[in-house]
Amino acid sequence: MTSALRTFRRFGQAGLFSAILAGSMLSTPVQAANDAPLIAVFTKNFTNPAYAAARRGADLVAEEKGATTAHFVPESPDNVEQQKALVVEALAQHPDLVIFVPVDDKAMVEDAAKFTAAGIPVVSFVNRLEGDFITHVGSDDVAVGYNGAKALFEGMNGSGKVLAIEGNPAAPTSRNRVKGMQNAAAEFPDIEVLGIVTGMYQKPAAYDVTVQALKNHPQIDGIWAANDVMVYGALDALNEADRAAQLVGANGLDGAINLIEDGTMLATVEFSAFKIACTAARAGLRHLDGQDIPDDITVPSVLIDRTNLAPWKVPLNERKCPTWEEIVTP
């Protein structure tokens, strides 16, 4: 087995956690506890806390419903070839259900289709993927980008120079958030977007592009980033350069909530991979039980600033999954 891949499994009923790290993957079929349904959970990386929260959400629902989870995560963040290999590994485990975040919404279409060809139902979540899937669970990313950018521009009193940091261009979430940011910018004629740089949804990449932008632009009044992790990288670059700017991200991560509370960040927009994964797992298990589910499920997003951050002060690792009825209205 390649050492570039990583997977682990969690038995929901007993809460037993077993990890195989950076040396091998599961090479024998997973035996679900007491024939419980096995959910194969695909996320993009181990570096973004939002995906750690998503994996926890799937685990919580599995434990609640008496299912088990096996997680398939590329060792290198958002690596297409590694996710393709993980699909092969997962197929060998014969899961009852797959919930799938593609690292690339184009490159992974044929690979995800292998599950449906094998008769395994698939729920796509976070990043929409074309295919014969039972549903997609996500949020309105254009609104996420728009609402965050509007809050930033209003916080700048409607004028100034802004650096925009997109995520991974292969991710629909990033493309749509950028579209939302651009829609907001069109409403503020005195806001100048200096450029859109690529931070790959990763802190180190966002740091690097912000360092370069600070060298190129003596004035940057605001930074809009497509997720909170990239805000962290941009903030490090600002601090090193002894510069300051208004900052807005997305996800509603614990670190961002703390930065908003102390005034370092202006706002973030809750794009809750945790709630989305909880709902994706619930949808898939309802399907296995023969219950109807919507073709498309949208988890609401919320702008978070100092006026309303109290509910998000509960750490991600202590939050409970929303019920089906809290997300899906009849």
Image: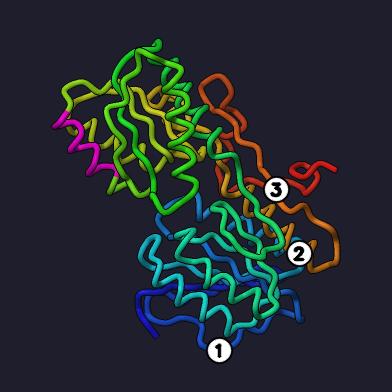
Q: Farthest residue in the left direction?
A: 215
Q: CA distance from mark 1 to mark 2?
A: 24 Å
**Pointers 1 and 3 in contact (CB under 8 A)?**
no
What amino acid type should be assigned to the residue bearing mark 2?
Answer: Leu
Reading the image, the residue beneath label 1 is 28
Q: Which residue is found at the position 44% from the left and 44% from the top?
A: 174
Q: Amino acid at mark 3?
A: Ile
At horizontal 20% and vertical 34% (from top left) the residue drawn is 213
Q: Quadrant of residue 195?
A: top left
| Helix, strand or loop at mark 3 | strand
Disc 1 versus disc 3: distance between alpha carbons?
Answer: 34 Å
Residue 247 pos. (x, y %): 37, 27
Is the C-beta separation of discs 3 and 2 under 8 Å?
Answer: no
In three-dimensional space, the C-alpha distance between marks 3 and 2, rounded to whole angstroms, equals 15 Å
Q: Is 251 a magenta residue? A: no
Say which residue appears at 37% left-offset and 82% top-offset.
2
What secondary structure is the magenta-colored segment mainly? Answer: helix
Residue 82 at x, y percent in the picture: 40, 72
Element marked by disc 1: loop
Q: How far across and how far down the image is residue 34, in percent? A: 76, 81
Observer-side mark, 1 or 3, equals 3
Please state, as top left, top right, bottom left or bottom right, where the N terminus lies in the image. Answer: bottom left
Q: Amino acid at mark 1?
A: Thr
From the viewer's perspective, tell me whether residue 15 is left or right of residue 75. right
**Residue 131 left/right relative to 296:** left
- Identify the magenta region: 206-216
Disc 3 designates what residue? 297
